[in-house]
Amino acid sequence: MGAGILTNDGRIWKSELYKLAAASASPLAVQGPHWCAAGNGDGTFTDPNSPPVEDVTQIGLKGELIRKKFTGSDFLVETGGGAITWATRTFNTSVNPTDILLLQYNFGFLEGNFTWKEIGFFAGDVAFGRFYNAAVPPLASGITGITINYVSPQNGTGSGLLDFTASGTTATWRAPGSATPGPAINIGAGGAFTLADGVDSSKIVRIQVVGGSLPLSNTNVTPSIDPPGDVALNGLNSVSNPTGQVARNGRLFVVRTIIDNPKTVDLERPVRFLVEP
């Protein structure tokens, strides 16, 4: 990604960090930029060549949908022919501290598979900024052999319809407020499956199926999706906060507007962030 813009709060955070480092103290409020967040941003932003201007006064994203902690961090040394390429520059990792830090974040295919229109990096001990899915997974579906382990935020709130047909061992999903279920998926073999609503394919649930435990007759349930709030998703928050409890929002360090469309291949989406003086 490009450089983005360093926010006012990010500048204050840097000066606090310098002062506290000199004092050999580092309270939670000034921990490093551990978190990368992505959101759907400004709805009027459709032209990637004409993005909205980032605002130095921002303290959060306009429409945050997911936040993850870094999966890798390395000190870098810029050198010709280095193993790490960044635009026209190359770097090697260093075992000794340098003034360049590389942070990497990995988003799973289903965790962040929406059109990214903004991305931000947050400092502090943060779990999650806004509603992402209805409950800390796994969530019992009400149908034997099926567990719901993901509910996309586009579903909104209310009761959806999860429908299982025994004759073809198929399942469908209808989102809250929708009148049309999505395509039937054969789940008889067991495993992980994604079911989408018939009107809006961004309204999905991901289910885990134990094939031998499925019902012998047709079954449907209406799982209730709770109202949105500040909910941390187990597995996306920090190791120190593994059970989904809410933590504070953190300090927005750098923010950038982008357009990165949903992916079509079930792979992780890596994000790299270079921190320089």
Image (cartoon, grey):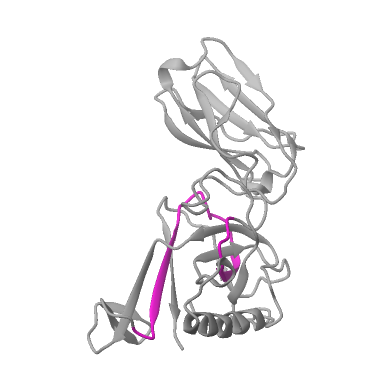
Q: Is residue 149 left or right of residue 210?
A: right
Q: Outermost residue, top direction?
A: 216
**Residue 17 x/y as whole percent:** 53, 80
Q: Residue at x 53, y 54 (%)?
A: 113
**Residue 100 x/y as whole percent:** 38, 83
Image: 113 above or below 91? above
**Residue 244 x/y as whole percent:** 58, 45
Asked whether the viewer can see residue 69, the reply is yes
115 falls in the magenta region: yes
Q: Can you tell which quarter of the image residue 85 is in? A: bottom left
Q: Residue at x 68, y 43 (%)?
A: 155
Asked whether the viewer can see residue 6, the reply is no
Q: Can you tell which quarter of the image residue 268 is in? A: bottom left
Q: Residue at x 73, y 70 (%)?
A: 44
Image: 16 above or below 237? below
Q: Can you tell which quarter of the image residue 103 is in? A: bottom left
Range of magenta residues: 98-127
